[in-house]
Image (spheres, grey):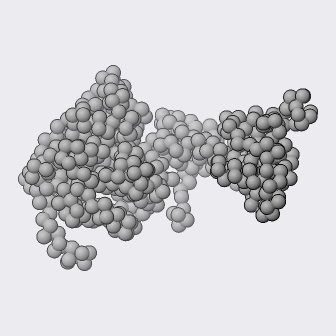
Amino acid sequence: MFVSDRMTRDVVTIDESGTVREAAELIAERRIHQLPVVREKQCLVGIVTDRDLRSVHDPEMMAGPVSAIMSRDPITVWPGSPLEDALLLLYRHRFGALPVTVAAAPDCCLGKGMHRLVGIISRTDILAALIEMLGIEEAGTRIEVELPEQSAVAVVGVINAVAQTQTRVVSLTLSGPRGRQSRRLYIRLSTIDPRRAIDALREAGYTIAHPSCDLI
Amino acid sequence: MRTGWLTHPRYIEHDTGQGHPERPDRLRAICAAVEKAGLLDRLTVIEPRAAEEEHLLAVHEKDYLERLEAACKTGARYIDVPDSAICRDSHAIARLSAGAGLAAIDAIMDGRIDNAFCAIRPPGHHCEVDRSMGFCLLNNAAIAARYAQRVHGLSKVLILDWDVHHGNGTQHIFESDPTVFYCSLHEHPSFCYPGTGYAWEKGEGAGEGATLNIPMPPNSTDAEYQEAFFSRFLPAARQFDPDLVIVSAGFDAHEDDPLASEDLTQACFDWMAKRTKELARQCSGGRLVSLLEGGYNLDVLATCVVSHLQILLQESEEEDLMLLKSGLG
Ligand SMILES: [Zn+2]
C-alpha cells in the first residue's frame, strides 16, 4: 500500500498572500488541523496548523500574511512512498498530517527543486488503512499463535495447519517485541468456529496465546 | 401458562455436512429431552408454516433471497461463507424456520397461548439483509419482529439476544429503527466472532439509543452476567416498554459449549428467562416468543431448553412465590 492509495487529493489550501484570519476561518470551517500554504495554487511554500493559529492573539498579526507564521520547507512525503514512510514521519515528528508532494516542473514559480502539492495524508488515513489491513471490521475470530522462532519455516507451519482446515484467512500479521526471539502471529479467521484451525495448530506443536482477563 | 411449542421434522433435514457444529443432532437432542421430561402434554403444539415471501422481504433483499434459493437448487455446499453450509432443501427449511416465529405470534395474538419457544434451525441472528453469515440463512428474529409490527400492529418490539455471539444481522437491520430495541449480551468482540457489538454501537440516526450492546469478557460467570443483565439491560428494557418480547435464545455461553469461552451454567439461563418473562408480564401483557439460536454441546443444549420451557410454562403466581422464597424478588 502506497501513500497515493490513502491520501486525500482534494486538499484545502491557502494562498501565501492570505491573512492569518483567513487561515483561521478555513481551519474552523473545514474542520481541519493543518493547512498547506501555496503559491499559484499548487506550489507548496509552507504549512500552518491550528496550534500555530491559536498562539496568535495580536490583532495586527491576525490581519497580516499567513506566510509570517507558517512553517517553511515542511517535511513532505512522496505519493509513491510506502505507507510505512508516512506512518514513521507522522509518528516521529508528532505531526497530524503530511503534505504529499512531487518535484515541481523546472519552470516552477518557486524555482528548481521545489514541491508541487498533490495531496495530504493524515493520522486518520493511516489508522483507516491499518484497520483495513488487520481486517478488524470484517467478520471473524481472532487468534494469536506463539512462534518459537522467527523463521519463515515457523510461519509456513502455521499457514499449512490453517490451510488443512480450509478456513478462510481475513488477515495475518507477524509481530513481537524487538530483539526477542519469540514472535506472535495474529490471524483473523473468517469463521464462527475456529476450533478446527486451533486444533490443527496445536497438533502441529504451536501454542495459542490466551487473553489475560484480569487486564480487561 | 399456555406455552407454545414450535418445531418441525424438516428442520433436521437441513444438512450442514460432516463435522459442522450446527448439526441436525441439536434438534434431535432437544426433542428427545422435551419428550422425556414429559413436557409435550403440557405444551401447546403449534405447527410452523413457511414464512411468506412478503414477510421475508420486509427484512431481506430480494436479490439475496434469490441467491439463496439458487445456491440450494444448484447443489452448492455453502452460501457466502463456508460457515453457512447448505443442502438442496435448506432454502425451504430456512423459510420454515423463519415461519415458526410468525405462527407463534399469531397464536399469541389469537389468545391460544401466552408465550412460545421455537426449536428451530437454521439459526438467524448473524444473517444480514443481503448476505448469510455464521450458520444463519434468514434472520428469524428480525422477520418475526417486523411481522408483529406489520400484521398485528404491535408497535414496539424488544429483541433480547443472549447467544454468546453478537447478533450483527439483527443489529444492522434495526440500527436506525427506534421501534425495535435490540439488546445483546455476548462475548467481547475482540475475542469472539463476529467482531461486532462493541458497547459504543448504540444505534444510528432515529434509532440512536435503541441498540444496547453488553460485551462480556471471556470466562464471565453467572454472577457477572446477572449483574450486567440486572443493572444495564433491565432498566433500559423497562424504559423502552415493549409490546412484544422476542428472545434470540442461544445457549452457547454455557461453560461447556465448544465454540466460545464464557463460563455460564444452566442456572444463569434459567435466571435470565425468569427475568425476561417477568419483564414481558410487566410491559407486554406476557407476550414473549423465544427463538433458538446457537448452542453446540448437545447435552447442555437439551437440558437448557427443557428448563427454559419449564420456566415459560410456570404460572406467574407460582413464580412470585418462588422468587419470594429465594429472596430474589
Ligand atoms: Zn452463537
Residue depicted at x 24% and y 47%: B149
Q: How many marks?
A: 0
> Which residue is at the front of the view, B142 or B295?
B142
**Residue B290 point in image, percent of width and height:** 24, 52
> Which residue is at the front of the view, A87 or A98?
A98
- Seen in the picture, residue A92 relative to A13 is either above or below; the reply is below
Left or right position of B170 against B99: right
Residue B199 seen in this snapshot: yes
**Residue A196 point in image, percent of width and height:** 45, 42
**Residue B137 point in image, percent of width and height:** 33, 37
Residue depicted at x 74% and y 50%: A22
Left or right position of A122 against A109: left
Residue furthest toward the right? A112
> Which residue is at the front of the view, B109 or B222?
B109
- Seen in the picture, residue B275 relative to B20 is either above or below; the reply is below
Q: Quadrant of residue B79?
A: top left
Q: Quadrant of residue B132?
A: top left
- Seen in the picture, residue B279 relative to B29 is either above or below; the reply is below
Residue depicted at x 17% and y 55%: B115
Residue B68 seen in this snapshot: no
Q: Which quarter shows the N terminus of chain A? A: top right
Left or right position of B51 against B21: left
Residue depicted at x 21% and y 59%: B284
